[in-house]
Image: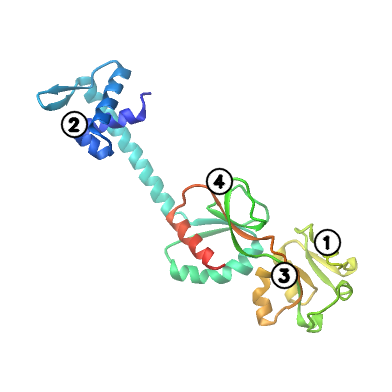
Amino acid sequence: MPPLTALRAFEATARLSGFSQAARELNVTHAAVAQQVRALEDHLGQSLVRREGRALVLTEAGSRLAQALGEGFSTIQAGVEALQAGQAERPVRISLTTAFAAQWLMPRLRDFWDKHPDIGLSLHPDPHVVDLRREGMDLAIRFGNGQWPGLDSRFLTSARLVIVGTPDLTGGRSDLTADEMSALPWIISEDWPELPDWLAAQGIRPDPDLVAAFPTEDLALAAARQGLGLMVESMALVEDDLDTGRLVLVRDGAEALPGYFIVTPQGPQRPAVKRFLAWLRAQS
């Protein structure tokens, strides 16, 4: 195949009947267009245009090629426009955990839709880290230290760990010792294998007979709100519970990291994605 730039220069020259007109459309010089057309003729081994007085006319071969290129570039343009239209209509796809979606994002979404009623969102809760490009995700909200190779990340909100329980369970106290907490019932999430090590580092060793395990963080948090046990949770997910007094803060880990980060693939973003990201960053 000849170079695409040469084909594009010749197509514009044939359609607009001159090098100067083609140069203005392609935003290059007259000489650059003429050079591209001559290079195309050399590549094909035949003449495509000729001078008749001051006019530029196509040869028979040039006419056939111009028609084929015109149809080809029109097909390409139609395909690109259809793709752009489809992208514009596609909802913003977001990968995140079920707990973060339910406890942090969902209570705030009314504000986003009040401001941007024309933008659709598609939430994809998943406890695992997914490949954003392969899964067709526009962004993710991830728990971690903000370092994911090949992706851009920006801090969203603190994920410092805290221990919480209902006022009835804790006696309304927020100063329980490690031994007192160890003697109380506990709620744990089965998809958090690092939790026992974190508790041990705090000097807390719950009685295995007083530990109730739930398959997901969402269910574990619901159980903790019913007073079934103490729970370790991210501060970001229990702020409303603490504000309303439904849960009591028993211990604050106060770590700077890990946190929740907005993670996006590198490269251009659709206008709808940019608007959602701007709103999301304003929440931090």
CA gap between label 2 and label 1 equals 77 Å
Q: Which residue is mark 4?
A: 133
Residue 119: horizontal and vertical position, in percent? 45, 61
Residue 222: horizontal and vertical position, in percent? 71, 71
The crowd level at tag 4 (other Cα within 10 Å; few <14, some 14-19, many 20+) is few
Mark closest to the chain's N terminus, 1 or 4? 4
Give the amino acid type for the residue marked by disc 4 in the picture.
Arg
Give the amino acid type for the residue marked by disc 2 in the picture.
Gly
Residue 47 lies, with reference to residue 13, above or below; the image says: above
> Nearest the camera: 100 or 153?
153
Q: Nearer the viewer, mark 2 or mark 3?
A: 2
Q: Is residue 114 shown left or right of residue 190? A: left
Give the amino acid type for the residue marked by disc 3 in the picture.
Leu
Q: Secondary structure at mark 1?
A: helix
Q: Which residue is mark 1?
A: 196
Q: Which residue is mark 2?
A: 18
How many marks the image carries: the answer is: 4
CA gap between label 1 and label 3 equals 17 Å
Mark closest to the chain's N terminus, 4 or 3? 4
The crowd level at tag 3 (other Cα within 10 Å; few <14, some 14-19, many 20+) is many
Mark closest to the chain's N terminus, 1 or 3? 1
Q: How is the image coloured?
A: rainbow
Q: Nearer the viewer, mark 1 or mark 3?
A: 1
> Mark 1–mark 3 contact, CB under 8 Å?
no
Q: Which residue is mark 3?
A: 221
Residue 156 lies, with reference to residue 44, above or below; the image says: below
